[in-house]
Amino acid sequence: MSRKRMIYEGKAKILYEGPEPGTLIQYFKDDATAFNAEKRAVLDGKGVLNNRISEYMMTRLGDVGIPTHFIRRINMREQLIKKVEIIPLEVVVRNVAAGSMARRLGIEEGTPLPRTIVEFYLKRDDLGDPLVTEEHIAAFNWASPQEVDDMVSLALRTNDFTSGLMSAVGIRLIDFKLEFGRYYEGEMVRTILADEISPDNCRLWDVETGNKLDKDRFRQDLGGVTEAYGEVARRLGIIKDNGASDNVVAFNGGAK
Ligand code: UDP
C-alpha cells in the first residue's frame, strides 16, 4: 500500500490527503512545543490522548449544533476531517485571567474576568502570532465581517457548552484557542470549527486543588503532562484508567 500524501506538517499534527475528495486525515503527533517552538519535547502518548479528547469534544459540540470539521476517528492517532480553508486567525476565549493576558494587563493569574472576552490573534509564527483587532481583520481582509460574527458566536457557544461539560467533572475552563475554516459545499461557504480542542489549547484547572491539567504543565516544567491529559480524558469518561502513557496504548486497542 502506498503511503498517504502529506499535505501539511504542523507542530503537533500532520494533515494527509483523505480517502474521498473534500476530506483530510489529521494525525496527532506526540511533539509538544511552546513559546513559538523555542521549547520542544516528545511526550509519549500525548497524541493518542489529544486525538481522543478532540474527537469527544467535537462530537459533543456537533450534538448541540455547532458545525465542526470532525467526521470520525480512524485509529489511535488519526481522524477523518472535512477539508477546509483555514481562516488565518486564532480565536481565544477567556473566562479567567491567565497567560499572556494576565501578563500584558498586569492582572493576577486566576482572577475571574468581569465578562467573557474573545480575542483574535493573527496566525503568523514569524511574528509570534500578534493580537489583532476587528479593524485589522477588516482592513487586511483576513476574514469577512460575516465570518467574524460567525467565529465570535460559535466561540461563545463553544465556551458555554465546554464550561458546563468541564464543570460537571470538576474542571474549570479558564481559556482556550479555536481555529475556524471555510467549508465549501457547492455554491455555499460555511464557517466551521477546525483544528483540535484538547489540553494543548485549553487551560483546565482542577476545581478543588487548582492543579493545572493542561499544556501549562509543559510550558512551566511542572511535570506529569501526559498524566494530566489522561486525567482529563478519564474524568470525561473517554478512558477508564489513569492515562499513564503505557496504559494509553493498552486502553484503546483501536476500538471506537
Ligand atoms: N493558545 C494556543 N496556541 C497559541 C496560543 C495560545 O493554543 O499559539 C491557547 C493557550 O493554550 C491558552 C489560550 O490559548 O489556553 C490563551 O493563551 P495565551 O494568549 O494566554 O498564551 P500564552 O502566551 O500563555 O501561551
Image: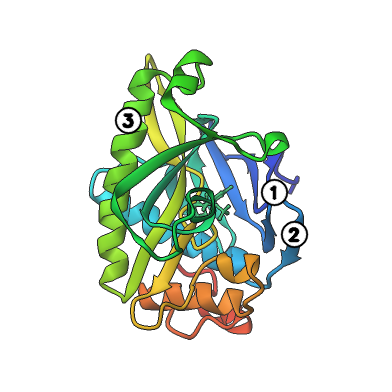
Q: Secondary structure at mark 3?
A: helix
- x 60%, y 74%: residue: 225
Q: Earlier in the sequence, mark 1 or mark 3?
A: 1
Q: Earlier in the sequence, mark 3 or mark 2?
A: 2
Q: Position of residue 230 (x, y in %)?
A: 50, 76
Residue that badge 2 annotates:
39
Mark identifier at residue 150: 3
| Disc nearest the viewer among 3 and 2 | 2
Q: Are marks 1 and 2 in contact (CB under 8 Å)?
A: no
In this rendering, does residue 20 appear at all? no
Mark 1, ligand 1, within 8 Å: the answer is yes
Q: Secondary structure at mark 1?
A: loop
Residue that badge 1 annotates:
36
Q: Is residue 24 above or below residue 224?
A: above
Q: Is residue 214 above or below residue 123?
A: below
Circle 1 residues within 10 Å: few <14, some 14–19, many ≥20 = few
Circle 2 residues within 10 Å: few <14, some 14–19, many ≥20 = few
Mark identifier at residue 109: none
- Judge left or right: residue 246 versus residue 117: right
Q: Quadrant of the C terminus?
A: bottom left
